[in-house]
Image: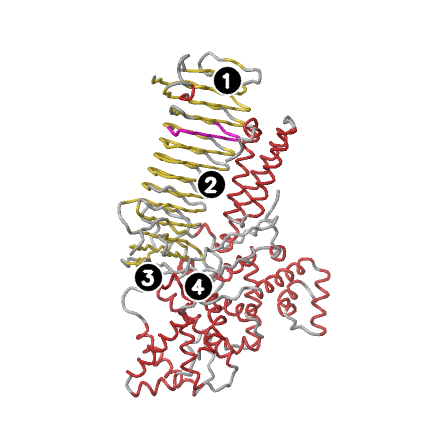
Amino acid sequence: MKAAAAALVVLLGAVVPAAAQPSRSPQSSRSSPATDSAGVSPARATVHERARLSIEPAGHAITKLSIENPLGDVRVEGYDGTAIQIETNKLAPDEDSLDRLHISLVPNPDGTVTIKTTADGGRERQPVARAAVRIDLVIRAPRDARVEAAVGSGTLEVVNMDAGGDLDTGSGPIWVRNVQGEVLTHSVSGRTRLAQVFGSVDAQTLSSDVDLDTIGGDRLVASVHRGRIDGRRVRARDVELTTTDGQIVLEAEAALRGRLVVSSFKGDVDVQLRRHGGVLIRARGTKVDLGAPVRTQPNGWVEATLGVGDNAPLIETALVEIRAMRGNVKFAIIESRP
Amino acid sequence: MEMLYHQYKRRVFGMAHRIVGQSDAEEVAQEVFVRVFRGLAAFRGDSALSTWIYRLTVNAALSHLARRGRRQEVGDDGLTELPAPPVTERDSALASRIETALALLPPGYRAILVLHDVEGLSHEECAAILECRIGTCKSQLHKARARMRELLGPNIAAQAIHTTGSSE
Amino acid sequence: MTTCETIQPRLTAYLDGDLDGERGSVVRGHLRECAACRQVARDEAALRDALRLAPPVDPPVSMWAGVQSKLAAAEVADARQPRWRRQVARWARWAPWPPTMPQYAAGAALAAAAVVMLYWRTQRVDELAPGPVAVAPIRTAPPHPIRTEAEQPAAVAPAADDVTADLLAEPARTTGSYRQVIEELMKLASDARTAWGDEQKVVFDAKLAVLRNGIDHAIQGRAQQRAQRALIRYLQLAVIRDDVMLAGGGAR
């Protein structure tokens, strides 16, 4: 029963200081510069308000950040500390509109911190367009906090975090850099870039490109409906890249027992592989070039076996499967390490 | 006294909740009950007890909002609590959108909607509680509902039927 | 003359049963002939009914204790006040809070108002806690997620030119974008289907039904979009790697 549970939490909260104590450095300024310090001058924004807040947990470490900002950018940066430091920047064409922009920050007793922005209908004299207001958040958080964030058309950027995250944007770009853990990203049309990510990665977009640079760990799945996938220094053990309509260009390193599956419905696929040990590759496409002698199967698959001697155990061979239903397949080994 | 508390606690808290939001609702509701108990002895009965209690609640909630708003201007760092809608298992999509939209209304509109539509009070009672003329109350109600309709988008009637999503 | 402009302001009153006799009949007559106003009336009625059904909100169990302690504190404070202050407080206790709709009578009320202001201001000074105000209060109950997401059936919400309305309409737009992609993939899938064997069709249809069911039963907004993404992945698999899909390799 909710009331009982709430009461229990209250009691616990009183006995054990598990909740966060906001300690504020009340720096807040309202000013009307033409541009903010980042040199961005949003059309017609003439009033802005900056603020800073620090939340130091007393009790639980902060385990998760849950951020929702449909009104601007979010940047989350990990650091070696326990507090959450937030810098907020609100912009609006006038004071009345600025007053409608709110940020709520709730530290929960279970170690998660929820940050949301909204524009309320509280005090408007006249309507203000969404494009005329914004709230940008820059958050420094303990590295071990998992980041769940949802952004609209703003940029969502997560760097130096160790517990992965779930990142969602509408049309805004997603940038992930130097992050470990289970990372899920999804966007309707925001360009997605992941660099130096280690762990388990799943990136999905409807109509924008995905760019992968230095990805390691057990799994990398990326799918795009319309757009391209580019990858370099991809070292995950199990890789699956898919586009419905778009090119795929990949430079990967096949782990010993790795699996690499690259497919497109429409669009050319170009894979370069640095291999360790044996590779079994099969491909199909309008035109297939594996850079090696091939066997063509009756079912249309083109196959080649590389680096596998008669005695080499097959289970240590990497499996590569490339498919371009309406496109050309090009595959090459770039350097071999026996 | 405790009996009175239990008799009115849901109405007072519910109204406070819908006007000021989740985190401040308890504080406001407590303030209201303190004023009720302290004023009860001198209550002259020139209005119904419930009207009087509702009035205390609305006034407390609205002035709390006004105070909170003012605090923000005075070098506050601009972070406030977003009113959260109550969530029950029976929530239909429309019900939860309505709670959200309510939170986005100007406070005065929120008050009249909660009093008239949620609590089911008559125009006369609302006028007594909000201390305005009946005609003013009626037109406030009309405007409040119109604003809600804007926020909720077209075809509210269809949204009220919790269809199991959209199938392509 | 009964145009929409004259009828719509009366709809609230009409729906609440405040228009009797001829005035009600005039509105009814217009509604019979005007689909637009009928829709507005339907919407407002649905809104009113939904508000009526809004669930009661239970206060936390701890609230009573809070009331008691606040009451006790107030009584202690009373006891500590100098006598003249207690007099003023007694007069002023009956005046309501700073009114948001100042419509006081006149004359005598002004004096009372002055007393109220005095009382109120001094009270306020005592009430305001010194130091930083906790604007991010400690949650004493599990937080309720803000449900800003909702699905618009068929039509997309009006592109109101105000930010708040736009934000409310956004989840529906996003779900709509997903739906469009699903439609495109379904077309490709039905083309590909013609080349499948019967068993393969059965596997596909079954999986499709499960995934669609997932979408239908998901809470509208983010959860539904997650279910839509699962369907998109499966359709891509079916269209591009049908041998894997149909061998039961399945979508993850």
Q: Which residues are magenta?
A: A235-247
Disc 4 marks which amino acid?
Ala
User: In screen coordinates, is A6 left or right of C229?
Assistant: left
Q: Which residue is mark 1?
A: A288
Q: Marks 4 and 3: CB-CB under 8 Å?
A: no
Quarter of the image where one finds residue C247: top right
Sort mark 2 into few (<14), some (14-19) or many (20+) by Cα contacts within 10 Å: many
Separation (CA) of disc 4 from disc 1: 66 Å
The chain to which mark 3 is attached is B
Mark carried by residue C113: none
User: In screen coordinates, is C192 left or right of A327?
Assistant: right
Q: Magenta region's main secondary structure? A: strand
Q: Which residue is mark 4?
A: A4
Separation (CA) of disc 4 from disc 2: 39 Å
Q: Position of residue C37 (x, y in %)?
A: 66, 60
Helix, strand or loop at label 4? It is: helix
Colouring: secondary structure
Is residue C186 highlighted in magenta? Answer: no
The chain to which mark 2 is attached is A
Is residue A241 highlighted in magenta? Answer: yes
Disc 3 marks which amino acid?
Asp
The chain to which mark 4 is attached is A
Sort mark 3 into few (<14), some (14-19) or many (20+) by Cα contacts within 10 Å: many
Disc 2 marks which amino acid?
Ser
The chain to which mark 1 is attached is A
- Residues flagged by tags 4 and 2 on a common chain: yes
Q: Position of residue A186 (x, y in %)?
A: 46, 40
Helix, strand or loop at label 1? It is: strand
On-image quarter of the C terminus of chain B: top right
Separation (CA) of disc 3 from disc 2: 35 Å
Q: Which residue is mark 3?
A: B76
